[in-house]
């Protein structure tokens, strides 16, 4: 066997064994065995001196190519084995990596709670569009085009004469149009007003409107339903107070306060020493609203109410800044798991 054949044989053997190597330790041994100072290839190079010049050049060149190839393959194999995690690193006794579970947003929790209470009294749920027409947001609810009550609704107007609904009451106008009495409907959803954002006001907030229309519905029904709601949501035995108020779509109209659940009416910081918490607006549906929807106000009567969601949520959970609901701070949101 010539030296040239010997070099080829060494290279072939080295590449084969590198290919089969299963660990970094084995690769290190192979490097010493083939390329080290006492290695096979080095031995060939040492014996070159005894050869004629032509043969010496040929064998030398072949040996250097072989060294380069072996070095490259060693590096490739080292990279590959360093990336692979050894099987023994798996420890079946360690606890698994849990999948983080989200929480239902506190406003949704409160809305569901309120909806559940009214559902128990036979109310159906209805929803409507966020982008409304002037007709459903105002006109059908007895806001005449130049009515000053429109000024209280700081409205976002959008293209095509439409607007972002300023309350959820337009859903009442839509449902009244679609259905025949008797009906009991609850309408939760998002509303929009052009307000300065502060600890107590936001451009977007939530409301739950509700109404009932049938023959012979009276203000006693309104008071009964709202009492049942307030007792269920805030606590038993809390008194309600009806204060005369004005809404274009109800006649008569009343703001409703519930006795402060914290001090039970004695006066404290939460109720600003008044003993009362303002929770909703209500009234008997205005005959015009029934008439616009095609119902005879001589035959049918009804009541309506609107609850802001943020305010009772803030009262119940002692939240002092409305912006916390909307800034996606997980430390805040996870409290209500
Ligand atoms: Zn109080």
Image: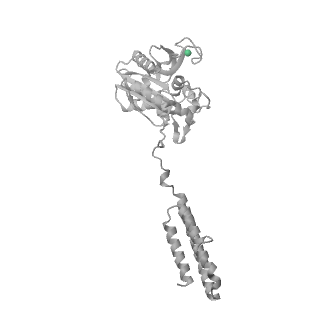
Residue 11 in sight from this viewpoint = yes
Q: Nearer the viewer, residue 105 or 60?
A: 60
Residue 192 in sight from this viewpoint = no
In this view, which residue lies farthest toward the top? Answer: 266
Query: Residue 30 at x, y = what percent?
Result: 55, 67
Please give left or right for residue 53 compared with residue 231 in the image: right
On screen, residue 6 above or below 327: below
Dividing the image into four quarters, tell me where ligand 1 lies.
top right
On screen, residue 258 above or below 205: above
Query: Residue 266 at x, y = what percent?
Result: 55, 11
* Quadrant in the rendering for residue 36: bottom right
On screen, residue 273 above or below 39: above
* Quadrant in the rendering for residue 50: bottom right
Query: Residue 31 at x, y = what percent?
Result: 58, 68
Q: Looking at the image, which residue is at 56% across and 32% down? A: 332
Query: Residue 98 at x, y = what percent?
Result: 47, 41
């Amino acid at each position: 066997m010539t030296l040239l054949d010997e070099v080829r044989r060494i290279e072939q053997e080295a590449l084969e064994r590198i290919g089969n190597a299963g660990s970094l330790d084995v690769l290190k041994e192979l490097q010493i065995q083939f390329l080290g100072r006492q290695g096979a290839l080095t031995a060939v190079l040492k014996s070159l001196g005894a050869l004629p010049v032509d043969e010496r050049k040929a064998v030398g060149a072949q040996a250097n190519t072989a060294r380069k190839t072996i070095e490259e393959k060693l590096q490739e194999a080292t990279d590959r084995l360093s990336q692979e995690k050894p099987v023994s690193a798996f420890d079946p006794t360690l606890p698994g990596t849990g999948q983080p579970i989200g929480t239902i947003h506190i406003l949704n929790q409160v809305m569901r709670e309120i909806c559940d209470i009214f559902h128990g009294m036979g109310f159906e749920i209805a929803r409507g569009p966020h982008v409304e027409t002037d007709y459903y947001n105002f006109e059908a609810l007895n806001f005449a085009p130049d009515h000053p009550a429109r000024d209280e609704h700081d409205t976002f107007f959008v293209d095509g004469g439409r607007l972002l609904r300023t309350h959820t009451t337009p859903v009442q106008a839509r449902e009244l149009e679609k259905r025949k009495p008797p009906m009991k409907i609850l309408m939760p959803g998002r509303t929009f007003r052009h307000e300065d954002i502060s600890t107590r006001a936001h451009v977007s907030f939530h409301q739950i409107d509700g109404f009932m229309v049938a023959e012979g519905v009276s203000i006693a029904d309104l008071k009964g339903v709202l009492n049942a709601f307030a007792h269920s949501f805030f606590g038993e035995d809390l008194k309600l107070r009806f204060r005369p108020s004005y809404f274009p779509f109800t006649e008569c109209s009343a703001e409703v306060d519930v006795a402060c659940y914290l001090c039970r009416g004695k006066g404290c910081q939460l109720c600003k020493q008044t003993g009362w918490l303002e929770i909703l607006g209500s009234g008997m549906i205005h005959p015009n609203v029934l008439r616009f929807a095609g119902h005879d106000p001589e035959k049918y009567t009804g009541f309506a109410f609107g609850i802001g969601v943020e305010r009772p949520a803030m009262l119940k959970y002692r939240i002092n800044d409305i912006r916390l609901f909307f800034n996606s701070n997980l430390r805040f949101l996870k409290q209500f798991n």
